Structures are given as structure tokens and as C-alpha cells.
Amino acid sequence: MKQNKNSNMKFVVALTLALVVIVAAVAVLSNKQESLPTEIKQIDVTGQPSLGEEDAPVTVVEFGDFKCPACKAWGEMIYPKLVNDYIETGKVKFSFVNVLFHGKESTLGSIAAESVYERSPDLYWSFHQALFDAQPVENHDEQWITPEKILEIASGFPEIDPTLLKEDMEQEATMENVEIDKDLVSEAGVSMTPSIMINGRMMEDPFDYEAIKAAIEQAIKDKD
Ligand code: CA
């Protein structure tokens, strides 16, 4: 009788343990599924400024903001490697989509950049770079993107007509393009800047160049 009770207890304990293990395993598995960046969002970058071969196997999209210090840092630390390793070698086409998380200044910078892109597409990337270069290293939260500052930056480009750029800013002439970007940002579920998307997959850490390389290599393999 005593022995029986003991083995019953053992059975109950064993059963409980087994259940705990199963519940834990299910929890681990479902967590793992959540953390894998398996979700692919097809973002249409038609009409966006782009660098590299038009038919490159991989498309990398930066969702960025001229007002964002991390975007300036990304442009200095990661972007040159991407250009050298993948854009110039024809493997990656790179596009930039404006994000307006910093309000009016983000919008003004985007309107101006879209204006330059529309009127002189060849100058876009240099102007884009010049805008980021003008971002103050300290006190970047203070207002610096103003029409005056943008015209000052543009004066470094003899091909840019300052009168037309001023008009475009006053009339918000390229707001339609900025709105398209805004829609892409919501569609892609962008919550931080910069966000880097590789063939529809959002990178968890935009500063992890090894992970970016791995994602690009994988995307090239997937295409083959
Ligand atoms: Ca755009």
C-alpha cells in the first residue's frame, strides 16, 4: 500500500515535470519564431533616388532623416562600406526614403532634397551628403534645418538654381513625394531611424555591418 502511494506520487511528479518541460519548450519555440526577421515586406521604391545598378539582385533601402544624428553616423560608418563592397560591384541598388520623425525640420529637409532630386537628379546624392554634413555634431536638437541654411548648402552647387529651390520650399512643391515616403514608412513599419531594409527584410541593428553583409549574401543566394 505504502509502495503504491509512493509510485503514484512519483508518477504525478514525473507528469508535472514533463508538462513543465513541454510548456517551456513551446514558449522557447514561439519566442524564437518571433525574433527571427522572417517577415518580408515588399516596398515599392519606384521614383525614389537610387544608387547602383538598376537591375542589381539586392535592393537596400535606408529609411532616414536629415535631422537624425544616428543617420549621420550611419552615413559615415556603414554607408561607405556598403558603397565599396556592394553598390559599386553591382550587387546592390540603394534607395533612400525620407522619415519625418523630427517634425517640421525633417519635412523641410525632405522637401528641399526632393526638389533637388526632381530638378537635378545627378546632384541628389551630393546634396543629400551635404545636408548630413551640415548637421551639427553638438546640439543637433536645436533648429538648424531652415530655408536659409538649405540655400547656404545649395550655394555650394552652382548647378542648383537658388530661386527655384527657394520657391519649391515656400510652396512645398515636392510635398507629394514626401507624402509617398511617409506612406512607405508606415507600410514598412519603421519605428526608428535609420532603418535598413534588405530585399524586404528589416535589419534589427542597422549598425551591425556583419549582419548586413550576411543578409545581402543570403538575398543574392535566394535570387539564384
Ligand atoms: Ca522620396
Image: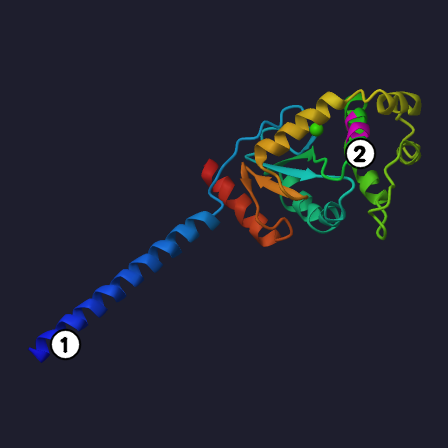
> Does the segment drawn in magenta span residue 118?
no
Residue 90 visible? The answer is: no
Q: Quadrant of the N terminus?
A: bottom left
Find residue 19 and report its image quarter: bottom left
Mark 1 vs mark 2: give the one in front: 1
Q: Which of the pair 201/125 is nearer the observer?
A: 201
- Would you call the spot at circle 2 few (<14 residues within 10 Å), some (14-19), or many (20 or more)? some
Relative to 1, is 204 on the left or the right?
A: right
Which residue in the structure is indicated by mark 1? 6
Q: Is residue 169 above or below residue 13?
A: above
Q: Which region is colored magenta?
A: 109-114
> Does the segment drawn in magenta span residue 110?
yes
Q: Is residue 75 above or below residue 44?
A: below
Q: Quadrant of the C terminus?
A: top left
The amino acid type, in three-letter code, at marker 2 is: Lys
Q: Are marks 1 and 2 in contact (CB under 8 Å)?
A: no
Which residue in the structure is indicated by mark 2? 104
Expressed as whole percent of the image width and height from the top left, the position of residue 167 reads 88, 20
The residues bearing labels 1 and 2 have C-alpha atoms spaced at a distance of 74 Å
Mark seen at residue 131: none
Expressed as whole percent of the image width and height from the top left, the position of residue 179 reads 69, 25
The amino acid type, in three-letter code, at marker 1 is: Asn
Secondary structure, magenta segment, majority class: helix
Query: Could you tell me which residue is drawn at 81 percent across and 26 percent down?
Result: 116
Nearest to N terminus: mark 1 or mark 2:
1
Please, what secondary structure does the residue beneath circle 1 have?
helix
Q: Is residue 107 above or below residue 136?
A: above
Expressed as whole percent of the image width and height from the top left, the position of residue 97 reads 68, 33
Residue 195 visible? The answer is: yes
Q: Which of the pair 76/57 is nearer the observer?
A: 76
Query: Could you tell me which residue is drawn at 62 percent across and 28 percent down?
Result: 45
Query: Could you tell me which residue is drawn at 22 percent across and 69 percent down?
Result: 13
